[in-house]
Image (cartoon, rainbow, N blue to C red):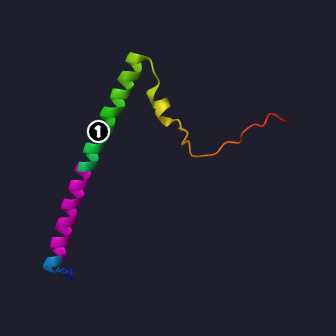
Amino acid sequence: MAQKQHKQVVEPKSDTQKIKSLKERIKELERIIGQKQLDIDFKDKMIELAEQRYNVDIKKKLGTKHSSGSSTTKKSTGTK
């Protein structure tokens, strides 16, 4: 019967530390993303409640583009 060969992988300590610190960084970033999502959900709910209470479409008004006032307009001379 043939024996199975086993390979032993040896990582330098610095690689192991890098992996550990990267995993910790991932956890921290996931926590931050979760917190930001809670903030977004909270603000969306507040907008929804304000829209219902004041009967105003806030989201639609936020999406409209405002005039920058920096463009020039053609003046009408009154002649055709």
Give me the residue at 35% from left, 22% from top: 49
Q: Name the spot of residue 42 as percent of width and height, x first.
A: 30, 33
Give me the residue at 22% from left, 65% from top: 22
Residue range of the region highlighted in magenta in the rendering:
15-31
Quarter of the rendering containing residue 19: bottom left
User: In the rendered image of this protein, does residue 11 appear above or below residue 49?
Assistant: below
Main secondary structure along the magenta-highlighted residues: helix
Q: Name the spot of residue 11 as percent of width and height, x first.
A: 17, 79
Left or right: 37 as drawn, with respect to 78: left
Q: Name the spot of residue 29 as percent of width and height, x first.
A: 25, 54
Give me the residue at 38% from left, 25% from top: 48
| Residue sitting farthest toward the left | 13
Q: Name the spot of residue 46 as percent of width and height, x first.
A: 33, 27
Which quadrant is the N terminus positioned in?
bottom left
Quarter of the rendering containing residue 40: top left
Instruction: Find out whether residue 58 is within the magenta segment.
Output: no
Give me the residue at 16% from left, 81% from top: 12
User: In the rendered image of this protein, does residue 25 appear above or below residue 35?
Assistant: below
Q: To which residue does mark 1 refer?
A: 39
Quarter of the rendering containing residue 17: bottom left
What residue type is disc 1 on?
Answer: Asp
